Image (cartoon, grey):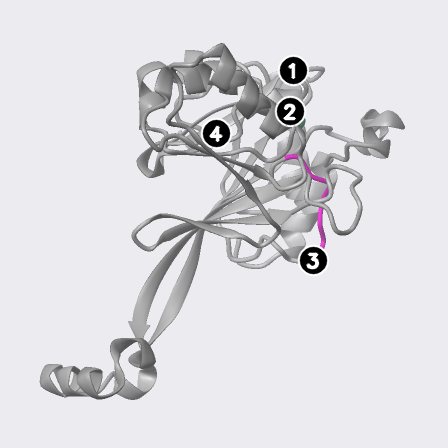
Amino acid sequence: MKISAYSTALFSTFFFLEEYGILFDCGDGAAAMLMGKSRKVKHIFISHADRDHLCGLLQFNQLNAREGFPKVYFPRDCGSFPYLEAFTKQFDPHVSGTEWDFLDDGQEVKIGKGLLVRAFRNEHIAHQKDTVKSLSFQLIRTTQKLKEAYLELSGSEIKAKKEEIGYDEMTYEKREILLTYSGDTPVEWDGRYNDSQMLIHEATFLKKEDMGVDGNRWNKHSTLDEVMKMISESKGIERLVLSHFSSRYHADEIQQAVEDEARRHAVDIPISLVLPGVFSRNILD
Ligand SMILES: [Zn+2]
């Protein structure tokens, strides 16, 4: 999978999944960095309304809007987006094709044949229990598989059975989590990322002391040591991408800390880093 990305806490975050035409978040500079490739984006999923995750939308939309695309999805209770939609429609009246839609906790969006994106609530923003202001996303591939009872049948028997009871009755849906994008979030210990072939997780702070009081009060983030501990306790995560580091850290410092924490928690899956201040054309390289 080819993913281009920029992600630096406070400044800007976006992840572009080229073959799926997906953009997770649209921070400042998304169009400037992706240039002609931004045309490939059909679905933009914004995790929350912090400005470093949405301020690239104005230009991105202006350059790429066409009938029905892009489709911009945002958390249900974020009041910023209806304002933004109304503003862009007046500011750039030639841009009318974009579709804006909110997503609820657990909602799924079909983005192609056998492909969907599932949104689920996270606790980045101190919101009330019944509101949805911050989301994580999963890219899921679905395939219809023949139920075990029918596996032994011949082609003609399957055909006959299909006419008798219908194909849906004979199959079940298999789901593969190709990727999970945490967005901004505190570490969660409930196993919600289990079985992700790839997890893109934030690690804003390298250690707890750096978080400060404010960092913990309204907008909650993760620290590297906690992320590694969570990974060591999770199941079936095959690859980790760490992102959204604070710009206070140097690349060397981050690399060393990641190495140390991975060793400490015996995490032995491949780990890639989206370092602060650097646009990466292929984060898995
Ligand atoms: Zn952020």
Location of mark 4 (residue) = 15
Q: Quadrant of ligand 1?
A: top right
Judged from this view, the residue extending furthest toward the left is: 156
Q: How packed is label 2: few (under 14 Cα within 10 Å), some, or many (20 or more)?
A: some
How far is mark 3 from mark 4, CA to CA?
A: 25 Å
Location of mark 3 (residue) = 190
Mark 2 and ligand 1: say if the CB distance to the nearest ligand atom is below 8 Å. no
Left or right: residue 93 compared with residue 161: right
Q: Amino acid at mark 3?
A: Asp
The image position of residue 16, as x and y in percent, is 42, 29
Residue drawn at the location 86% of the way across and 33% of the way down? 217
Assess whether residue 73 is covered by the magenta stretch: no
Q: Amino acid at mark 2?
A: Ile
Location of mark 2 (residue) = 254
Left or right: residue 232 compared with residue 36: right
How far is mark 3 from mark 1, CA to CA?
A: 31 Å
The image position of residue 249, as x and y in percent, is 69, 17
Q: Quadrant of the N terminus?
A: top left
Q: Amino acid at mark 1?
A: His
Check the image and report above or below for 250 versus 263.
above
Magenta segment: 184-190
Assess whether residue 185 is covered by the magenta stretch: yes
Mark 4 and ligand 1: say if the CB distance to the nearest ligand atom is below 8 Å. no
Q: Residue 134 is drawn in which quadrant?
A: top right
Q: Quadrant of the C terminus?
A: top left
Residue drawn at the location 26% of the way across and 86% of the way down? 165
Q: Is residue 13 visible to us here?
A: no
Location of mark 1 (residue) = 250
Q: Residue 172 is drawn in which quadrant?
A: bottom left
> Which type of secondary structure does the marked residue at label 4 adopt?
strand
